[in-house]
Image (cartoon, helix red, strand yellow):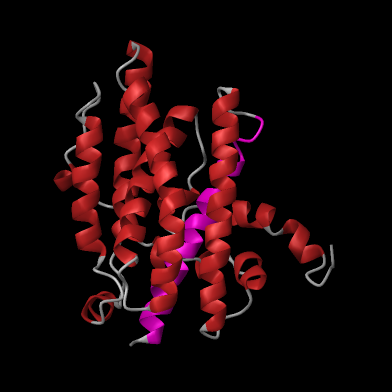
């Protein structure tokens, strides 16, 4: 089993969860409804916790400890997709990102529950319950607001068009893609994208929204190997501010 291939997979998953967790936490105190304020805060906590568990597996494979990995790297060392690092924008964009991302994550963890790499399979079985709740929450709000008022439909539609090229970037192939497939660690990004597209179409078809033609879009790739937007480094600086003051501090 190619350990570098497994690390590559773990890093991109962990970094996605960490960065989107911090983005979602920015809704704390600013949610459009108290219910959504609490929901986004809770899901943010779950995602940061999931990233820690993935970094812990990386640590067991010889990488640095989770805190160092999370807080001491620069933007070009991160493997997250550009989709998760984009600013929250208005609630409609955050909701669309939440729906597109967590639909993919639920399928990813369901697939990984059968991984031949046992530590990841065990974690996926544990995490997919939380992710199922996240995905269900997003679907409920997309169906409700995507069929509500002219304004809600228009705002979600605009965000869907804006988000889709970035969402397709979630499926940027690993440079170890075939190794992961051949060793049955992961069935691969194309297989994941196929299931994701069907799931997204099922939900959107129950709304007044229109899906962009995904085949005509150019996915925003690059994030998996250090090519990030101007939004990531300021977020990392903010995230790591306390840790960098004194990494050895006891609390």
Residue 4, quarter of picture: bottom left
Q: Say which of 197 and 112 sits in front.
A: 112
| Picture quarter with the N terminus | bottom left
Eyeballing the image, is 74 above or below 169? Answer: below
Q: Which residue is drawn at 29% across and 71% down?
A: 186
Q: 199 above or below 60?
A: above
Magenta residues, as a range?
Answer: 3-29
Residue at the far top: name it.
149
Q: Quadrant of the C terminus?
A: bottom right
Left or right: 120, with 167 as reference point: right
- Front residue (pair 217, 157): 157
Residue 233 painted magenta: no
Q: Quick check: can you spot residue 217?
A: no
Image location (x, y in percent) of residue 178: 22, 78
Residue 40 place in picture, x, y as percent: 55, 38
Seen at 59% across and 49% down, the residue is 45
User: Does residue 6 show up magenta in the picture?
Assistant: yes
Q: What secondary structure is the stretch in magenta mostly built from?
A: helix
Residue 42 x %, y %: 58, 42
The reply, left or right, for residue 43 in relation to residue 206 is: right
Res 80 quadrant in image: bottom left
Relative side of 105 to 228, left or right:
left
Classify 10 as above or below 148.
Answer: below
The total number of labels drawn is 0
Q: Position of residue 84 (x, y in %)?
A: 46, 50
Q: Is residue 145 at all visible to an observer of this figure?
A: yes
Camera-side residue of 120 and 18: 120
Please determine whether, in this image, residue 140 is positioned above or below residue 199.
above
Residue at left offset 15%, top offset 47%: 215
Q: In which quarter of the image is residue 227?
A: bottom left
Residue occupying image coordinates x 36% and y 80%:
5
For the residue pair 60 and 158, the one nearer the viewer reads as: 60
């Amino acid at each position: 089993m190619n350990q570098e291939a497994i690390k590559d997979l773990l890093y991109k998953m962990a970094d996605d969860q960490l960065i989107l967790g911090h983005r979602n936490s920015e809704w704390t105190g600013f949610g459009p409804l108290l219910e959504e304020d609490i929901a986004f805060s809770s899901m943010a906590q779950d995602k940061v916790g999931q990233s820690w568990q993935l970094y812990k597996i990386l640590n067991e494979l010889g990488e640095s400890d989770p805190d160092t990995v999370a807080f001491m790297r620069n933007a070009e060392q991160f493997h997250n997709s550009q989709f998760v690092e984009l600013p929250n924008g208005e609630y409609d964009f955050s909701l669309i990102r939440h729906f597109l991302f967590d639909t993919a994550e639920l399928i990813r963890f369901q697939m990984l529950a059968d991984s031949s790499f046992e530590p990841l399979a065990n974690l996926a079985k544990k995490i997919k319950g939380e992710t199922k709740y996240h995905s269900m929450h997003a679907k409920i709000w997309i169906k409700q607001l995507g069929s509500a008022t002219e304004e809600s439909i228009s705002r979600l539609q605009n965000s869907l068009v804006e988000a889709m090229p970035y969402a397709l970037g979630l499926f940027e192939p690993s440079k170890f893609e075939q190794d992961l497939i051949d060793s049955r660690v992961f069935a691969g990004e194309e297989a994941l994208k196929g299931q994701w597209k069907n799931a997204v179409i099922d939900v959107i078809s129950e709304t007044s929204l229109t899906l962009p033609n995904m085949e005509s879009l150019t996915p925003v790739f690059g994030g998996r190997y250090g090519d990030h937007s101007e939004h990531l480094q300021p977020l990392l600086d903010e995230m790591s501010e306390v840790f960098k003051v004194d990494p050895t501090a006891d609390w």
